[in-house]
Image: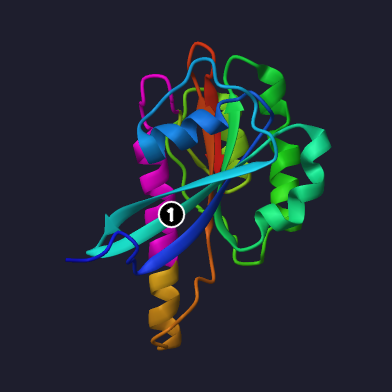
Amino acid sequence: MASNDEYDYLFKVVLIGDSGVGKSNLLSRFTRNEFNLESKSTIGVEFATRSIQVDSKTIKAQIWDTAGQERYRAITSAYYRGAVGALLVYDIAKHATYENVSRWLKELRDHADSNISDLRHLRAVPTEEAKQFASENGLFFIETSALDSSNVEQAFQQILTEIYRIVSNKAIESSQDNVQPGSGAQIIVPTADDHAKSGSNCC
């Protein structure tokens, strides 16, 4: 029987967005199926892991969560290093957090490794404004709720599956047995809980 520590691929995915948009609850909902209505703002950086199966392969996701406050921006480079995917989160009840999506996307592209790449397809989205932004930036869009867990699993499954597909295709193209992950994905994730409604765009 395989050990819990055995996996075929290890993918680092970062959660980015303003403070208080629900990043930590997305992380805890996906990795532990927990939600805390009274959760406090993250201080520094936290991460958790969870493994999923894709095409009979074990994908271990290392999901990193960081504080959205400006005073923690000094950790930026280390936070993004090695990431192959990102969930860009905003709160659908706070328009200012959506307005900051462009800044977070720029930071992601400025600091992430070159192995971060965009998904060039788009899901249906609830608002034309967010749909247009996602389309213009080549992002996948999915609305989630960590409170009732709607679409949280789907959002993470989608990004991890897309990263796996990209990595697998690159391995086939290069005909190498041990290809390191060379591309990733981002997703915009709007959340929509009473206290943590958010939207996410994944790149």
Relative to the observer, which residue lies in front, 4 or 35?
4
Element type at marker 1?
A: strand
The answer to whether residue 18 is left or right of residue 72 is left
Look at the picture and state if 202 lies above or below 91: below
- Residue 154 appears in which quarter of the rendering? top left
Residue 186, x across and y down, in percent: 55, 49
Q: Residue at x 56, y 32 (%)?
A: 23
The answer to whether residue 193 is left or right of residue 164 is right
Q: Residues within 10 Å of mark 1 (few under 14, many from 20)?
A: many
Residue 109, x across and y down, in percent: 71, 54
The answer to whether residue 167 is left or right of residue 54 is right
Q: Residue at x 57, y 19 (%)?
A: 92
Q: What kind of secondary structure does the magenta stretch mostly adopt?
A: helix
Q: Residue at x 60, y 25 (%)?
A: 21
* Figure label count: 1
- Residue 90 appears in which quarter of the rendering? top right
Look at the picture and state if 79 lies above or below 195: below
What's drawn in magenta, residue-wise?
Answer: 144-166
Q: Indicate the amino acid at tag 1.
A: Ala
Look at the picture and state if 83 lies above or below 90: below
**Residue ID for mark 1:** 61
Q: Residue at x 36, y 26 (%)?
A: 149
Relative to the observer, which residue lies in front, 17 or 8?
8
Q: Is residue 25 magenta?
A: no
- Residue 160 appears in which quarter of the rendering? bottom left
Q: Is residue 149 magenta?
A: yes
Relative to the observer, which residue lies in front, 148 or 192?
148
